[in-house]
Amino acid sequence: MTVTEPQLRACGALPDTCTERVSRICLTCGTSDGSAEAWRSGDNCCAACGNEPYQYRDECALCRGISVMPSGAGARRCVALDVYRATGRVAFPDKVPDQGRKTPDERRDSKKPRDHKTPDDPGPAFPPALAAIGRLISTTWQHYKRSLYRYAAIEGRSNRKELVSFVVWQAFGFVVMGALGWTPLFLAATLLPTWAVAVRRLHDIGQTGKWLWMLIFWPVAVVVLPWMLLWPGTTGRNSYGAPTA
């Protein structure tokens, strides 16, 4: 909490008039007699060097500001405020309000965890290219998981996104399992999901899954089947159901 100048004046840390003892300093010899009463009476001469009258200054013993001559009933205008504005030094530091004291709102805010995120906080920002790659990986992985969950479902349809995602992640799994020497096990585990997604992809273009029997004549199948599997699906519902999202 920052203490403002009006608050410092209100609490007496920056007084308008000198309330502390005023030291009278000789401008000739520099002697400080501690009070105006120590000067010679009548001619206001220094008791040490006897300088000419009025060759002195009055200084606040606390804020060290030069006190202005009294106007009226002996009140001296304190220059503590001028000193504070020039140097930032407070005349009466013990009267400054406790800056460590927090308001109820500040105490409630301080109890919140440092890593607390508001609903509008997007979190750490990533470069657009990395963010796009992350979204692509996440999307293809979701399609691949959906195909694995429907490992034996030949009803319905699968769009090209699902097929391409399945092929990409199958290739990645083939590389990893090949490095571990588990290729036969991986192919056996994913044979049924691969067959099911191919059937649903044929359904998406309005064809029956019996076209997969073409694999018996593999020289023809390797040319025709990829073309069929990548063909755009029919618009709207067909005999196998509604298109997938």
Image (spheres, rainbow, N blue to C red):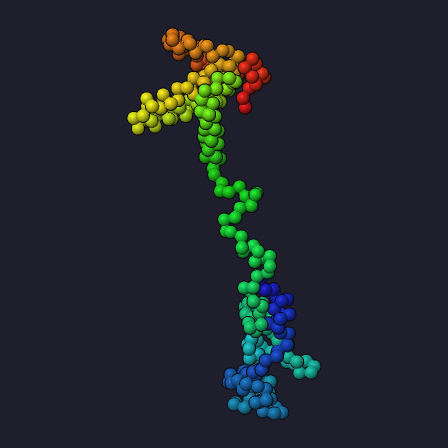
- The quarter of the picture where residue 171 lies is top left
> Residue 244 appears at what percent x and percent y?
54, 21
- The C terminus sits in image quarter: top right
**Image height check: is 23 above or below 101?**
below
Which residue lies most toward the front here? 152
Quadrant of the image occupied by residue 167: top left
Q: Is residue 72 left or right of residue 160?
A: right
Residue appearing at x 43%, y 14% in the figure: 226
Count the marks: how many?
A: 0
Q: Residue 239 or 176: which is nearer the viewer?
A: 239
- Residue at 49 percent across and 42 percent down: it is 124
Is residue 230 at least partly visible in the picture? no
The location of residue 179, given as percent across then percent down, is 31, 27
Q: Is residue 206 above or below residue 70?
A: above
Q: Kindly give the residue lying farthest to the bottom in the view shown.
A: 41
Q: Residue at x 45, y 27 (%)?
A: 145
Image location of residue 157, percent across then percent down: 52, 18
